[in-house]
Structure formats: structure tokens, C-alpha cells
Image: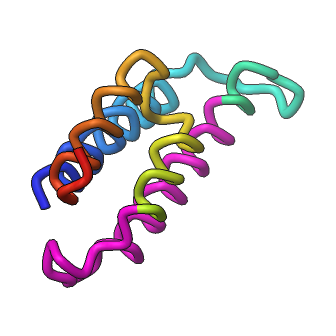
Amino acid sequence: MAVCEAIRGRIEDRRDQVCREIGEYPTPIPACDVHFNRLLEERRKVFEDLDRLGDISGGARASEIDVAAIDALIVASTAIPEKEKPALRRALQTAAGGG
């Protein structure tokens, strides 16, 4: 399903951005560095989103995709900007034949 690939692409873009920020972070990094710790937490959440999307869409055919689960992922994801979520949700519903 093209919408799943668009979601995956958006999450992967955020993953790459966060990993780049972590890699470029100035050293030494104290354990109490709030910004760095936030980046690590965000990276963890991004990888969780990718795993979740993989679990949902896996090798399934478009007719077998759990639309409700993907919609919930879009809503809950911190990797997808809020301004992009409505368009992704509409595209998902349209692709699923609901809109």
C-alpha cells in the first residue's frame, strides 16, 4: 500500500535526522544533558514506530492491511509532524476504500 510506504518514508526521514543530530552532538556529553537524552528517547520512539509499522504491514497485501492499526500509528507517532497527520489519515482512508 502506497500510504504505508509514505508513512515509512516520513518516519525514516525523522530517524535519519535524529541519528544525524546524535552523531554530530558535541562531546563530552554529560549524563544529565537533557537535550541529548531527549534525542536518544526520540530515536527509540522512531525505531518503535518503524517496528510497529513493519508488524502491521509486513508482507500483507493491501486488502489485508489493518487500517485501524495504521491510523492509530499515525495518530500516536511523534516522528510524523502533526501538520502532516490529517493528509496521511485521509490518504489511508481513501486507499482503504473509505473515503
Left or right position of 94 against 18: left
State which region is magenta.
Answer: 39-67
Disc count in the image?
A: 0
Give the percent coordinates (x, y) of residue 86.
38, 27
Q: Kindly identify the residue that appears in the image at 17 percent across and 53 percent down.
A: 5
Figure quadrant of the N terminus: bottom left
Residue 4 vertical position relative to residue 65 in the rendered view, above or below:
above
Task: Pick the quarter of the image with the C terminus.
Answer: top left
Name above or below for residue 82 compared with residue 48: above
Work out whether residue 11 or residue 89 is closer to the camera in this orientation and state it: 89
* Residue 65 located left or right of residue 20: left
Q: Main secondary structure of the magenta part?
A: helix
Q: Nearer the viewer, residue 55 or 26?
A: 55
> Residue at coordinates 19% horizontally, 46% vertically from top-left?
94
Q: Residue at x 45, y 44 (%)?
A: 74
Residue at the right extreme, as displayed: 32
Q: Was residue 56 drawn as part of the magenta stretch in this picture?
A: yes
Does the magenta-highlighted stretch encompass residue 81? no
What colour scheme governs how the chains and residues are painted in the rendered image of this protein?
rainbow
The x, y position of residue 82, in whole percent, is 49, 21
Answer with the quarter of the image where residue 36 lies. Answer: top right
Q: Relative to residue 12, is residue 62 drawn left or right?
A: left
State the residue at coordinates (37%, 72%).
Answer: 66
Q: Viewed as shown, does residue 9 lie left or right of 22?
A: left
Instruction: State whether residue 77 is above or below residue 28.
Output: below
